[in-house]
Image (tube, rainbow, N blue to C red):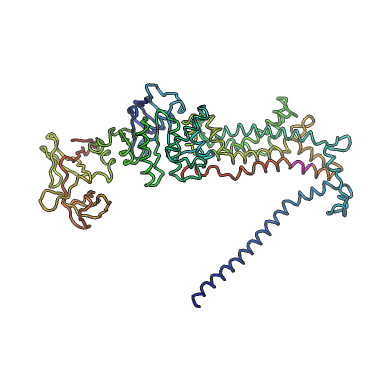
Amino acid sequence: MSTLEPVRERVRGVAMTGLRADLYRVLKYAALIAWAIFVVAPFLWALSTSFKSDPGVVGGATYIPFLEYEPTVDGWTALFRDTSSGGISMQGPYLSSLVVSLISTAIALFLGTLAAYGLSRFTFRAGPLGNNDITFFFISQRIMPPAVLAIPYFLLLRFTGLLDTHLGLILVYVAMLLPIVVWVMVDFFNTVPIELDEAALIDGCNPIQAFYRIILPNCAPGMVVATLLCIIFSWSDFFFALTLTFAKVQLLPPTIVILNSNKVPWWSLSASALVSVLPLVIIAFVLERYLARGTLAGVIRE
Amino acid sequence: MAEVVVSGVFKRFGPVAALSEIDLTVHDNEFVVLVGPSGSGKSTLLRIVAGLERQSEGSVTIDGRDMAGVAPKDRDVAMVFQSHALYPHMNVFDNLAFNQRIRGVDRKTVDARVREVAERLEITELLRRRPRQMSGGQRQRVAIGRALVRDPRIFLFDEPLSNLDAELRVRLRTVIKRLHKEMRRTSVYVTHDQVEAMTLADRVVVLRDGRIEQIGDPDTLYERPANEFVAGFIGSPAMNFLQGEAAGGVVRIGTVETTAADSLSGPVTVGIRPEDLLAEGAGDGASIRARITLVEPMGADTLVFCTTEEGQELTVRLPRYTAVRERETLSLTPRPGAVHLFDPETGQRLN
């Protein structure tokens, strides 16, 4: 019988660690749930508010539809109604925002990846300055707060006649996004061994083909990160959109903010806020699966 | 037909000369191995032939055509890298097919060629795999396959086996040798491993500090090294070097004498390979006496490490069944005619 003792010992040991593991798991989930509520609650609140009207908002917090407030889709239909009939006519600004942010993102990605590839693969010299200085120069564009740049940009665009145009805003955004792309992509290109470029060159590629057929596909996660950052920045920029466009071109963020006037239509404000995050959510979902793929594992024998 | 002529090539990185005065002709169908310690410039030379690096001076011609300004893709060379450099985002089939597709070869031909090469290298069952799903040896096989599919004029190998373990290295070495026997393509192979150099090469080029020390077939290099560096570099275990004194047609090493040219006099460095030291029994006077410090049975033969009375370390390769024990004393004599003499100052061969 004595031979059984250690076995029982072990079984009890397992039970103990099992209990501890359970406790740990409970705490872990509790923390995560708390955080999730903290993050999601504002969206839920906006969602509920978007179906309310005056009485449901001004009289204190109401939660349950039909019981505590009468749900209405007025907040949502107002998005598409003309301003003359009390709506905010969001389609125009929405489309403008999409066009401006997608085009500036595309241009910034195109120029930025090429610049980053060059900085990663070739040695540049300008007197005492080398590649790292050039990279820093790119990134340093972002040190200045946008407020400092607003007036120079304003004068620049007025001088070139691009004030209050899509093109002017796109140019400004490209300047703003380029450092992000260069910064992210230089890092990614540096992790791709140069032998891949060389193998491609010998296999029959010219340098441009080597870049987009071999190197770029292996930097997909970097491209995704850069794309997401660019779209987020350009889509949600308020400052330049406010200062550099007024009448002809109207972007989404200022349009929404301007709703905060004398009598705030909380329901439309909530609805437009929800609609405005939609593109980001969609893009994040589409691109997310490319993020995790560690395509580079096994390029070089570890 | 593919002849590579490298003439008067220098390569400088800033003030540092990586290659100096390189003259080398690789004949048609020849397998030439560039060997040397790290930093000897062997990879740089290969990369200049490939077009991945540009020489500071001198010229490279392939089949009489000057390669100045010719892009790597237009030189009709294929290269196998030390790091295999397979494209991680493609499976093996696409890796092998890539160079054909980019050159616009039609799909049917590409397909047939890839399958043929895969069969030849026994990697057919790997065709759907990604590089990261394979072992080091499999990856390097695929890398060799990628070069084979091309059927290029010239094969370049940049230390292709250096990252593999010993057993795989030997196995892939024979694969490469057999392929060369079958295909007969001009090949330039870089390695720091002198055994690889000796086993693969038609001719070996020994490099040190960016200069060619000697060019020759493996036997010549082994039997008549041009200088002390080559003598010490080629052969494993390395050649023994002893101090000797030449006078009147004789070189004296301690009490041992060997013949030499009459004109030779003064101190010389005597090189004797481990297998050229004979343990001919004890005591008859004219021998190098050395105490055994370590015995390494290798199977086919036995390596004996010993120290002479003057405190010099010697390595001796003895036949398999020689009964030797540590702390015993050996009486060694050099095999007649197998003694290499070098100038102690310049290191150049004297006999």
Q: Position of residue B342 (x, y in %)?
A: 21, 38
Q: Is residue A122 visible?
A: no
Up/down of B71 relative to A30, above or below: above
Q: Residue furthest top?
A: B65
Is residue A104 found left or right of A15 in the rendered image? right
The residue most toward the bottom is A1
* Residue span colored magenta: A272-276
Q: Horizontal and vertical percent for residue A270?
A: 80, 45
Residue at 74% over, 35% down:
A97
Q: Residue B189: give x, y in percent of width and height.
A: 37, 35
Q: Quadrant of residue B186?
A: top left
Q: Position of residue A241 (x, y in %)?
A: 74, 35
User: Is residue B195 within the magenta segment?
Assistant: no
**Of A193 and A185, the residue lying toward us:** A193
Count the numbered circles shown. Answer: 0
In this rendering, does residue B340 appear at all?
A: yes
Q: Quadrant of residue A221?
A: top right
Within the image, what quadrant is residue A103 found in?
Answer: top right
Magenta region, mostly helix, strand or loop? helix
The answer to whether residue B283 is above or below residue A234 is below
Position of B102 compared to A223: left or right? left
Please determine whether, in this image, residue B170 is positioned above or below residue B63. below
Q: Seen in the image, is B328 located left or right of residue A156? A: left
- Is residue A274 located in the magenta-colored stretch of the structure? yes
Q: Nearer the viewer, residue A126 or A234?
A: A234
Q: Residue at x 60, y 45 (%)?
A: A292
